[in-house]
Image: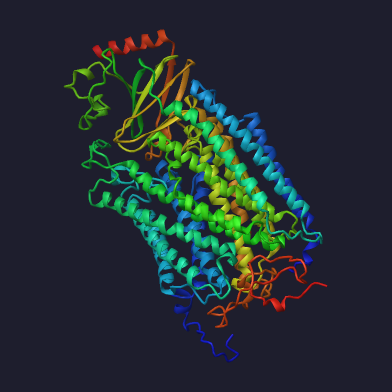
Amino acid sequence: MGSRKSCAGSAAPAVMMAIVILALVGSTLYFHIAKTWWFPPAITPVGHRIDHQFLITFIVTGIVFVLAQLTLAWMVFKYRDHGQKVRFVRGSHMLEVVWTSATLVIFVSLGVMAAHAWGEVHFGGPAPGALQVEVTGAQFVWTFRYPGPDHKFGRVIPKDIDASIGNPLGLDPNDPAGKDDIVVPDMYLPVNRTIELMIRSQDVIHSFFVRELRIKQDAVPGLVIPIHFTVTKIGDYEITCNQLCGLGHYHMHAMLHVLSDAGFHQWEQKQEALNAQ
Amino acid sequence: MSSHASPVHHSEAPKGWLRHYIFSLDHKIIGTQYILLGLSAVTIGVILSIMMRIHLAWPNAHIWGFSNGVVSPEDYLRVITMHGTLMVFFVLTTVPQSGFGNYFLPLQIGAPDMAFPRINMLSFWFTFVALIVLLSSAFVRGGAPISGWTAYAPLSAIGQIAGPGEGLGQTLWVISIALFCGASLMSAINFLGTTIDLRTKGLSLMRMPLTVWAWFITACVALMAFAVLLAACILLLLDRLAMTSFFIPSGEMVSGVLLKHAGGSPLLWQHLFWFFGHPEVYIAILPGMGIISHVLSTFSRKPVFGYKAMVLSLSVIGFMSFMVWGHHMFVSGMSPYSGLAFSILTLVIGVPSAIKTFNWLGTLWGARIQFTAAMLFAIGFVSVFVTGGLSGIFLAQPALDLYLHDTYYVIGHFHLIMGVAAIFAMFAATYYWFPKMFGRMMSETLGKIHFWMTFVGIYCIFMPMHYLGYAGDPRRYASIESVHYLFRLQPVYVFISIAAFITAAAQLFFYFNFFWSIKHGKPAEQNPWHATTLEWSVPTPVPHDNFAGHYPTVYRGPYEYSVPGVADDFVPQDLAPELVAKAG
């Protein structure tokens, strides 16, 4: 097709483009504001901070998104070929400097702001007196271990791992520190107390994720990875695996039960009694 | 071409079907071979994604090709692994660079062929064998691997015991990727040598079309990235076959068996893989950026806005692409301080991408836009690139990645920015260059139907995936049956699947248009788009040695459209200044 013949009917694609882009922008804004599919409420202070950072990022990128898409639609409509003269321009040094520095400042500022929440999760250690819980991933189950009354985890030996005889973690029978360890398939935590998880894996990489905690951490064989948080809301939450670990990846699931202080104490005593039998 | 006696040497096409079409040394044939290989791979890749979508939306549906028609969890993982591997390596890496680059780099720089035609042929045949080896993994005992296209160790390293497909299937996968690395390394050397050495008289660096710049920078990136992946593949192969422990730590208890490996690091695989893997994203998209700049300028009838900024941003992206791999590993157990550094670097690499977007909008500003199918895909590219780019700003912040990592949000993000954007660039390139490749025009009407269905379709597929991510839906789940909070997402799965079927069906318009037009399209003029670069200065079909021994001289930059005081609205690069007709 020749460059002159294309004028006829060129409004149709321009209008169509504007309609599609408006629908995109409209639906995107709608689903973000109506929160049709959304994060469940956060249950940790750091979770709220992360949500706040998400909101800031959404506002900033949302403005850029709407402006960029609408500008595109507007330009496509306005400059469709209706026989007009082209504005011959090779560029603008000033504009390049302006939009380069503006995006640099905006992007890096977002990164610096987000660093606080990240630092809260990972840079400092937990407060003294935190409850330690060991989280172990294996194809395709989670196992949780508490140190028991002696506050010490017993030694584990890989060759002793045998879930069929009730030793899924390979606790060394000769280590006295392990006698009182509580080993359970679901996680129980007290509310309003600092928790430190020690995340491990026995075989391949898994990933511990609880939506309400806003925390995800891979469980890597050969490493013990600590994370810490404080839960402020009693309730039951789902734990999933988020790193492809084999054919049962999708059903590697456990529950997190957050109990009142008294409820947790009661649960602990019951487990200790079971251990003593 | 051979009708006039010329004192200049020029070569004849080899006689014989096998030498001409199969073991060809001609960059145009090799480029076409790559494009057809990519077309085959993308066809299989799309069929696999249709299987995924049927299974996810209707888990009990019977699908042909699976035992008893039932997609087992391991089948699902085989399908995602093959889908990802085919698409990333054999489509996104192959077509924009090796396919279109091979065909049009020599033409755009006024060269008779690539610098090393035999290495070029070897690269293609390595790629072909790599594809065959990959596909063969589906037919061996245990079937195709289940470890995803990222093949994280130890899952991918410890053999059959890790799960079905982790035996011979995974070994073939690693061999295939290693062969592909070899092909890409040879190809990169060829692109670099050609661009540096074979540019015609007057074609200085800053007169090169942005496509040539993009292919050049991509080759630089590929040379370093694939070298590292090749090394990683060899180490993985040794872990699998020679009992080494590069990626396997001690004390691995798998399915009741204590492994004898000791001392390796699973994170080492991730570092090596993503040191390749992130540059790979740019290997897939940089040629697309070049093509989009090229097409936008042609059909805007305007020079590319900020040519120098475009060259500079391509270079900065290429350079920085090696500094951001850690953003794939925020939750991997890597040092959180490294995470912070990678986060800031990742946000910084967003800047040159933003610069490109602004300059594309600048190119449209004050233009006279012609809505060809190629141009529509170029405009669609800009929209998709903005959308996919901005979701990257969320993922670049480790605090937000803590939630969004490995959810459907990531799938939505990278499919838009890497998959769809690059595919749109390939479509734009096909509609744009088809007349030069086959001497005929594609149907614009079919092209436009194809565009609108695809453009609306991909947004309907990938935008809802972001919302699934907000709801915490983990990727690579064969079923949502075990997680209560996923139950209510089922309608979204159905919606995405229907959108995917319609979008896939829209591609039939493309297939038909492509193959029908090769024989029956309207015959094309030499320069149907009134474009300026050298590929349009040669006759159609292009002579065997491109310029028939008469190499053009380049007098100006690549995007001289609507120059004030000139009669035509385009000035070809090789038109001597005294021949440029003055306006009025």
The quarter of the image holding the C terminus of chain B is bottom right
Q: Which residue is most to the left? A: A174
The quadrant where residue B4 appears: bottom right
- Tell me, yes or no, if residue B498 can be seen here: no
Q: Nearer the viewer, residue B365 or B19?
A: B365
Farthest bottom residue? B5
In which image quadrant can residue B428 be found?
bottom right
Question: Residue B63 appears at what percent x and percent y?
Answer: 49, 48
Q: Nearer the viewer, residue A275 or B365?
A: B365
Name the spot of residue A119 as percent of width and height, x first: 45, 28
| Residue at point 58%, 77% (across, down) | B542
Residue at image coords 76%, 70%: B566
Residue A53 sits above or below residue B242 on the image: above
Where's residue A97, x and y in %? 63, 48
- Whether residue A140 is visible: yes
Q: Quadrant of the N terminus of chain B?
A: bottom right
Q: Is residue A159 above or below residue B174?
A: above
* Residue in front for this viewpoint, A91 or B32: A91
Q: Residue B292 falls in which quadrant of the image?
A: bottom right
How many marks do you count on the picture?
Answer: 0
Q: In the displayed structure, does residue B331 sit left or right of residue B531?
A: left
**On the picture, is B87 further left or further right than B166?**
right
Residue A88 against residue B537 in the figure, above or below: above
Determine whether A137 is above or below B529 in the image: above
